[in-house]
Image (cartoon, grey):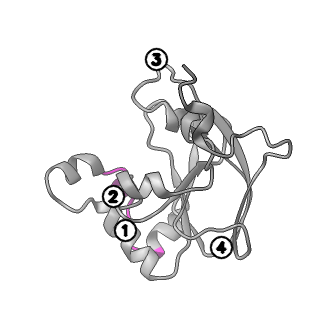
Amino acid sequence: MRFTGLTYRAHNPAWAFSPTSGAGAARLGGRFNPVGIEALSSSLSDTGAIAEYQQGFSHRPLPTTLCAYNVDCDDIVDLTAPDELNRHHIILADLASPWEMQYDEGRIPTTWEIAFRLIDEGVSGIIVPSFASNAPPQAKNLVLWDWSDKPPHQVILIDDNHYLPRNQSSWKDSI
């Protein structure tokens, strides 16, 4: 399917200079991206983005930079749709599996196996429910494995006034 619309992503302010990078995700891995695979994860709502960023720390909110993106991306699979789950032989429980625990136990997380399979099938990204404990009930995320600033997998940051920093120099200690 083709996804066209706005998405939102909350960033650590120190990394807001590179809002379309998936390098951090590749370095650390995530629910739907194995270590070494870049991913751009965003939410379909601003409240979903904040919930994702504050996971586990909603009682102590951290500074954040909220960005919005215009997305026009082909080859998306909506894993919130039961027919798509069935078509790809995925069950919701697999998406919700405790990927960090599986990884810590030396196993390949179930969600990474799903990601490998879908990437091999030419899927550029997925729409999934948010699994952040503090997320609104209907929160959804868009996770991209293939994106650029050009079609058919286009992601454009909305920063018309160039408010975001261009590099990390604004975070250097001036003393």
Residue 17 placed where, x, y %? 63, 45
* Mark 2 / mark 1, whichever is N-terminal: 2
Could you tell me which residue is drawn at 45 percent across and 51 percent down? 24
- Residue 40 is drawn in which quadrant? bottom right
Residue at the disc numbered 2: 94
Numbered circle sitting on residue 114: 1
Q: Is residue 48 visible?
A: no
Mark 2 and mark 1: Cα distance apart in space? 9 Å
Task: Of the two numbered discs 1 and 4 on the same chain, state the one appearing first in sequence.
Answer: 4
Looking at the image, residue 66 sits to the left or right of residue 87; the answer is right
* Residue 23 placement, left or right of 73: left
Q: Are marks 2 and 1 in contact (CB under 8 Å)?
A: yes
The location of residue 126, given as percent across then percent down, is 54, 63
- Residue 70 can be seen in this image: yes
Type of amino acid at the residue the image marks with label 4: Met
Residues in magenta?
87-98
Amino acid type at image mark 1: Ile
* Location of residue 21 by image quarter: bottom right
Q: CA distance from mark 3 to mark 1?
A: 33 Å
Q: CA distance from mark 3 to mark 2?
A: 30 Å
Q: Compared to 5, does 46 lie above or below?
A: above
Toward the viewer: 30 or 132? Answer: 30
Q: Amino acid at mark 2?
A: Asp
Which residue sits at x=55%, y=62%?
A: 81
Q: Secondary structure at mark 4?
A: loop
Q: Which mark is residue 1?
A: 4
Q: Is residue 88 magenta?
A: yes
- The residue identified by callout 3 is 60
Which callout, 3 or 1, points at the residue further toward the start of the chain? 3
